[in-house]
């Protein structure tokens, strides 16, 4: 380095330090003040005191249609499967039922089947179920939100599998979508239970402590919220100063994509993935009837699509793991089911299976899909085991990270989801990185 450039760099460094000290003094003082006041408010709140109110679940069954006969015909193959048209439900509303049918057709149909008969002994039936036909749907709501692992008894028949029979959907579906799919199930497949609607906000706030339902006045929670908010504001101000003062470590370059892949998009148009150079891209494998974690992967891509659908420098790609099943027409229907519009920056692509698999492994450096032997399948549609990580690619076609948004440990899945959002925003904000 020459003396001139060394002198210039030293001057820039001194100027930056001066700016940071000037900015940082006010930030640190402001952040510290917020922290002190917030801690005082939280401390003055004291212990929450409220009389627990145990939650009583209604288990009285309403009349339901008899379970399907044992010799009922087998359901049609899933490739051509569609859920039945929603039956009218008192108070359910056409929009709620339509939403429920759409969610069932994209999320539930692989395990519970188009007929609602399930896949015994792994996946219980919904048709004529004594868990579905109850006056109050509390248990079903909790199962959809938080998932359920066996054993369980449905209509007197045991389901004893230790596998997670019902994955949690609370993070992927909204209250309206959950209410819609439960209303749809409770009014179809011969079921006669009432609709489910999202409840309006209560006048007081509830929380659960030691298995009991506890009410606390909104005023108390507002005071607690104010204290926590001020403390968080202080932490954010200090964190912002730290980010300004400390340079960010560049995202790693995991791989350079050198090859290309020509595929067919859901619209029927032939596209090349190299056309996405110059854009920040997130890619992932897709098996539309996957009984494992594809729903969580697609849910994360839905969020990214909603956040960046108007940006011309961002794109999403879902690569079909099973092109023989996931044809352009099927992918088009699936995309509509998950809310992806034709004009959105989200390609659902299919083509020659081996070329797609080669691109996944050689270019994206994902684990190669593996056919699952018939005796090890969770259900008859469980043909392939494949990588469930999302891949972040920069404008230069370099892989910058992998994100396991579906993980057995929820904490890791949450961390990966948050990191993906930060890294996408970072590459969009810094085109040169």
Image (tube, rainbow, N blue to C red):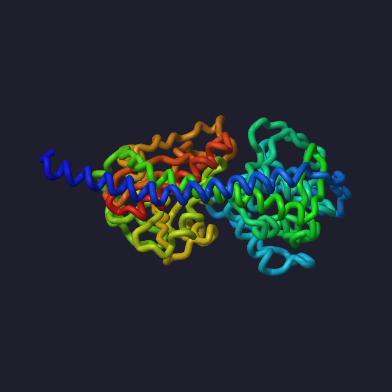
The answer to whether residue 217 is seen in the rendering is yes
Question: Which of 72 and 92 lies nearest the eye of the viewer?
Answer: 92
Quadrant of the image occupied by residue 322: top left
Q: Is residue 47 above or below residue 183?
A: above
Measured as percent of width and height from the top left, residue 328 is found at 42, 57
Is 32 left, or right, of 85 in this rendering? Answer: left
Is 111 left, or right, of 352 in this rendering? Answer: right
Measured as percent of width and height from the top left, residue 396 is found at 26, 49
Measured as percent of width and height from the top left, residue 33 is found at 57, 48
Question: Which of 217 and 405 lies nearest the eye of the viewer?
Answer: 217
Q: What residue is at 82 percent from the left and 38 percent from the top?
A: 156
Quadrant of the image occupied by residue 49: top right
The answer to whether residue 286 is seen in the rendering is no
Q: What residue is at 36 percent from the left and 55 percent from the top?
A: 429
Quadrant that contains the N terminus: top left
Measured as percent of width and height from the top left, residue 28 is found at 48, 46
Is 202 left, or right, of 25 in this rendering? Answer: right
């Amino acid at each position: 380095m020459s003396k001139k450039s060394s002198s210039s760099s030293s001057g820039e460094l001194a100027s930056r330090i001066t700016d940071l000290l000037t900015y940082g003094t006010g930030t640190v003082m402001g952040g510290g003040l917020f922290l002190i006041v917030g801690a005082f408010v939280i401390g003055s709140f004291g212990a929450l005191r409220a009389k627990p109110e145990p939650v009583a679940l209604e288990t009285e069954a309403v009349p339901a249609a008899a379970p399907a006969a044992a010799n009922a015909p087998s359901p049609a193959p899933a490739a051509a499967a569609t859920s039945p048209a929603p039956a009218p439900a008192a108070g359910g509303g056409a929009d709620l039922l339509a939403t429920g049918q759409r969610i069932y057709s994209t999320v539930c149909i692989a395990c519970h089947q188009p007929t609602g008969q399930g896949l015994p002994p792994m996946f219980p039936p919904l048709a004529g179920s004594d868990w579905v036909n109850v006056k109050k749907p509390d248990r079903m709501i909790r199962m959809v939100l938080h998932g359920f692992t066996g054993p369980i008894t449905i209509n007197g028949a045991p389901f004893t599998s230790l596998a997670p029979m019902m994955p949690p959907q609370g993070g992927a579906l909204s209250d309206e979508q959950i209410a819609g799919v439960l209303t749809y199930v409770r009014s179809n497949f011969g079921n006669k239970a009432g609709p489910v609607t999202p409840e309006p906000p209560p006048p007081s706030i509830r929380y659960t402590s030691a298995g009991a339902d506890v009410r606390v006045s909104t005023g108390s929670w507002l005071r607690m919220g104010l204290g926590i908010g001020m403390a968080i504001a202080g932490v954010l101000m200090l964190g912002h100063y730290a980010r300004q003062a400390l340079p960010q470590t560049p995202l790693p370059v995991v791989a350079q994509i050198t090859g290309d892949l020509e595929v067919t998009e859901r619209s029927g148009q032939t596209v090349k993935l190299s056309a996405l150079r110059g854009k920040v891209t997130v890619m992932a494998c897709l098996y539309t009837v996957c009984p494992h974690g594809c729903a969580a992967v697609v849910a994360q891509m839905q969020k990214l699509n909603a956040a960046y659908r108007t940006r011309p420098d961002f794109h999403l790609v879902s690569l079909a793991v099973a092109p023989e099943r996931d044809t352009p027409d099927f992918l088009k229907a699936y995309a509509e089911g998950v809310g992806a519009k034709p004009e959105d920056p989200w390609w659902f692509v299919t083509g020659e299976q081996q070329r797609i698999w080669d691109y996944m492994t050689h270019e994206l450096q994902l684990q190669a899909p593996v056919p699952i032997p018939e005796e090890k399948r969770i259900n008859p549609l469980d043909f392939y085991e494949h990588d469930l990580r999302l891949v972040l690619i920069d404008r230069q076609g370099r892989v910058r990270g992998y994100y396991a948004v579906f993980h057995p440990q929820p904490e890791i899945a949450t961390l990966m989801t948050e990191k993906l959002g930060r890294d996408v925003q970072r590459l969009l904000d810094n085109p040169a990185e």
